[in-house]
Image (tube, coloured by chain):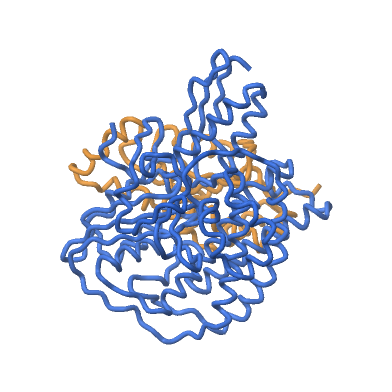
Amino acid sequence: MAKKLSIGWFSFCCSEDSTILFTELLNDYYQKWKKIVDFKVILPMQRREELADLDVAFVEGAIASREQEEKLKKIRAVSKKLVAVGACAVVGLPSGQRNNFDTKTLDEINFILTRFNYNDKVKKISDFVTVDDIVPGCPMDESIFLQVINKYLREFGII
Amino acid sequence: MHTLDLNIGEISKIEGKASLSVKIEDGEVKECKFKIDEFKRFYTQAIRGKDVLALPQLTSRICGTCSNAHLLCAIKAVENALEITPTVQTEILRKLLNFGLIIRDHALHLYVFVMPDLLGVDNILDLDENDPKHHQILDDTFRVKASGNNLSKVIGGRSVHAPYPTVGGFTKLPNQNLFPGLIKELENTRPAILRLIKIFQECDSNLERDTDYVALIDDEFSFLKGCIIKNENLTITCQDFRRYLDGVVIPYSHAMGYKFMEKIHMIGALSRLNLAKDRLNIRTKEDTNKALRLFPSKNIFHNNLAQAIEILHAVDSSVDILSNLSIKDEKPIPIIRKAGVGIGVIEAPRGTLYYKLAIDKDGKVINGDIVVPTGQNQVGIERSIYEYIKANLNKNKEELTNEIEQIIRAYDPCMSCASHFLKVNWL
């Protein structure tokens, strides 16, 4: 069997708009990609989650807790390349709006931050792991996403 | 089964993150906690001080799945606060944009999240294309989703966070030359949607619940206008919604729950069809006559069938509109910033979405109260799971897990929406 590009799609603190755009890209590209891409982990679409041996991990969303930070590092450890997708992953916003709240507003939300162990600040993906590529935009820029996936299809010798 | 700890860590094939913990001791359900695990992004606080023109595009970012519903509801609330009456053309274009969302969003839920359960596969991409039935479903999946997506793109500029709709109108009007192609594409989806309706009509999953049904209803099933109706025996105006909707503190969930008149209520496609199936598009009614006889229904799984029928209604209504629509050159109505309170209520794909905005004399948001569909269904989801487990204690852990996930999916919850608000008087 010909080698396929093994990819994972992960989501942290965000609106998951890029996930939606990704599922819509499948309308046009699934017939082509199914021959060359192994969709190994896409939790919104599947139950199984095999977190191992990924060629490329696409990560959407910002990091808001220690638990998310640890999961991100696990993803990085099993992925040859990691791509930050969408504004929250790339620059930390708009999910990180609370970073700029004044003291009074922070006092208002503090009990939630404490109760569920939120991190003090919401941060972008590259604050925790090495990011090989970015797909900016809110939602992600589809044309840049296609450029990135095509780049890795070539780099991994799939096409 | 007498004793069991059941933990579903991350429920799959839903929008966003949720989990469930169940404890059964000596044949009794001691604990059943449905938890929304999405981390809050505190939009309630973040919108304070923002200008009314910027607000709809900001709150659209609450949810990628139903972003255009947030956009349209926020615009409606702002226009009501500023006493702006949109033009007839603007209202028609907003209807089309929302129909595009209904088609795409329901199709995503039914084909991508629910269908694998019916076909016994992990996910839609596992379907065997050499099997004619599987091949057909895969083809239908992408065809129907694409038609809703393309409708939203033509009308709003993008299917997610549409850039053209604004307070007072549209910043860019759709290209009328694209309408014939859209009409053809939508017409071509009808056979696929009718197949989808047949699948859910014949599905024997059943969980009957006695609950109240609530929806915003108008004469043409537009999703965007009308009065709030409960069980056909109570009609209230949108302005009064807060007198009936009460927040419920759920300490283990990141999201607020809600009850309607202190009782568990259900919103979404099942409620809409239970309350207003006679107002669907005439062509839809003709072609789904047999399926429509199943409504009103108490079966939670009929929410899936109701969504399938709504896809057809959105397609047929869009074709009707596009076939007769001649775009006039219009600019958005200029706004005059002033103090006021505006309420917006629409039917998002998953149910009634409420915005209440208080605005100061400079057009800045003082406070916002946003109640999303999944917050309202959250209490009912947990209760349905509890009732299901209580009646099925003889089943093993795997069966329970699979069937509980199917119940949750039948509600089509959206955690991204649900968890990004905060009511401050939490205990």
Q: Residue at x 45, y 46 (%)?
A: B374
- Rendered location of residue B150, percent (x, y): 57, 69
- Rendered location of residue B281, percent (x, y): 58, 68
Q: Residue at x 68, y 50 (%)?
A: B200
Residue nearest the observer in this picture, B74 or B393: B393
- Rendered location of residue B69, percent (x, y): 44, 60
Q: Quadrant of the C terminus of chain A?
A: bottom right
Residue nearest the observer in this picture, A69 or A148: A69
Q: B162 left or right of A51?
A: left
Residue at the far front in the pictured view: B233
For residue B144, above or below residue B37: below
Picture quadrant of residue B406: top right
Q: Colour of chain A?
A: orange
For residue B31, above or below residue B150: above
- Rendered location of residue B15, percent (x, y): 52, 47
Q: Does any portion of residue B93 appear in the rendered image?
A: yes
Picture quadrant of residue A155: bottom right
Q: Does any portion of residue A18 appear in the rendered image?
A: no
Residue nearest the observer in this picture, B352 or A3: B352
Q: B95 left or right of B171?
A: right
For residue A26, above or below residue A116: below
Q: Residue at x 35, y 75 (%)?
A: B86
Chain that appears blue: B
